[in-house]
Amino acid sequence: MILKPLATALTLALTAGTAFAQCGGDFGGFVAGLKQEAISRGHDPATVDRFFASVRYDPKVIQADRAQGVFQLDFTTFARRLISANRMQTGQRKAQEFAATFDRIERDYGISPGVLLAFWAFETDYGAFQGDYNTLNALVTLSHDCRRPELFRPQIFAALELYKHGDFEPASTTGAWAGEIGMVQMLPEDILTNGVDGDGDGHVTLKTSAPDALMSGASMLRSLGWRAGEPWLQEVSVPAELDWTKTGLDHQMTAAEWQALGVQPRAGTMLRPDLPASVLLPQGRNGPAFLAYPNYRVYFEWNQSFVYVLTAAYFATRLEGAPVFDPGNPEPGLSGEQMKELQRRLVARGYDVGDVDGILGEKTREAVQQVQLELGLPADAWPTPALLNRL
């Protein structure tokens, strides 16, 4: 399971002010504070007692939270690891099996089947591996931990609402270590807000009902800003003389303007020449290249890892017939420790890289591009040992 800090979770403000401990301290006392806060929000005390009766601290959740090294992989390695022949074949079978659901999603939400199929595949292998962590324990443990309580604490009260609706069982509901539930892994607040009863049984059951999970995922994507009927990603080839400073998510031109500069689709024609788009070079100017349309940015509301997002978006195009991407011949990248050293040196020069975590995220890419320009190097945002040595 890969952590997805969902933007919708971050929007739910803590309403209790400073009346209750927001994190840390004795775990029993912390849970007592949660119960008091729930009652202060208007929940029945007996219901609150039943909801929290089985909750326990889970140290394995904290271990999982600290071990996300998969994001240190480069795009080609990560994509080849996640996109297997079995996932392709299973995706094609699922598209046929749930054709009616995907038709409904496309009609009601304007989202192509490949988009939800890719999430379904990467999150749970089409529902086969949904996680076996007790969800309430995970949410309370992560809220007690003081690293990111603002993300997880609101989910506890959303789970309480689901419990009152009959769609959450504190002692037996399981999912990912970060509290996501079901086939496409959604946090309780997102289920509460965007859950859809896709199979018409009167409940939103994301663990066992593919129509519920897929329709709910589509509803969530729309709420995050998905533009109906528009593309999200297209593989392109780039000319050797392209102005690399124009590449990256922080730069946009219409697809037609990119084409006038020599950027060409690897297959077919530009999907939407009129739409604004960014040229993405996940491994620099000599590696694979993609044109990212506005819908691509919605992926970052689902997951904030650049490598995960690009891989999920690319896999969605593969499931809809796009060819295998051209890996090119990129320069070698940096190891995790080398990336941390690069980040430290960039910070020392005044650049904002976010956390010094050894992960090549969007802020680090932007800082690399800026320092490459400063040093007179091709500003393609791909950090190499040569750049580290120059710094």
Image (cartoon, grey):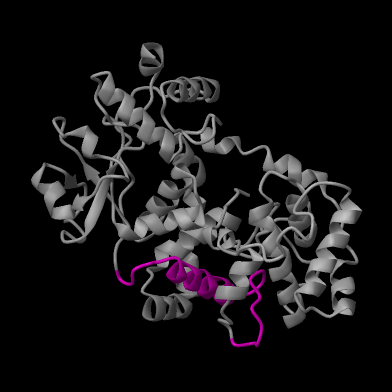
Name of the residue lying farthest toward the left:
260
Q: Position of residue 267 (x, y in %)?
A: 21, 51
Q: Position of residue 307 (x, y in %)?
A: 45, 42
Return the residue nearer the eye: 240 or 295. 295
Return the residue nearer the eye: 11 or 188. 11
Question: Measuring 24% from the left and 53% from the top, which residue is drawn there?
Answer: 277
Query: For this view, does 252 lie left or right of residue 315?
Result: left
Looking at the rendering, the stretch of residues picked out in magenta corresponds to: 200-229
Confirm whether the magenta stretch covers residue 225: yes
Image: 1 above or below 346? below
Query: For this view, does 213 lie left or right of residue 177?
Result: left
Question: Measuring 84% from the left and 61% from the top, which residue is drawn there?
Answer: 33
Return the residue nearer the eye: 350 or 63. 350
Residue 88 sits in quarter: bottom left
Q: Is residue 152 among what the camera can see?
A: yes
Q: Position of residue 330 (x, y in %)?
A: 32, 27
Residue 352 sits in quarter: top left
Question: Measuring 75% from the left and 74% from the top, which residue is drawn there?
Answer: 41
Image: 69 above or below 383? below
Confirm whether the magenta stretch covers residue 336: no
Return the residue nearer the eye: 22 or 169. 22
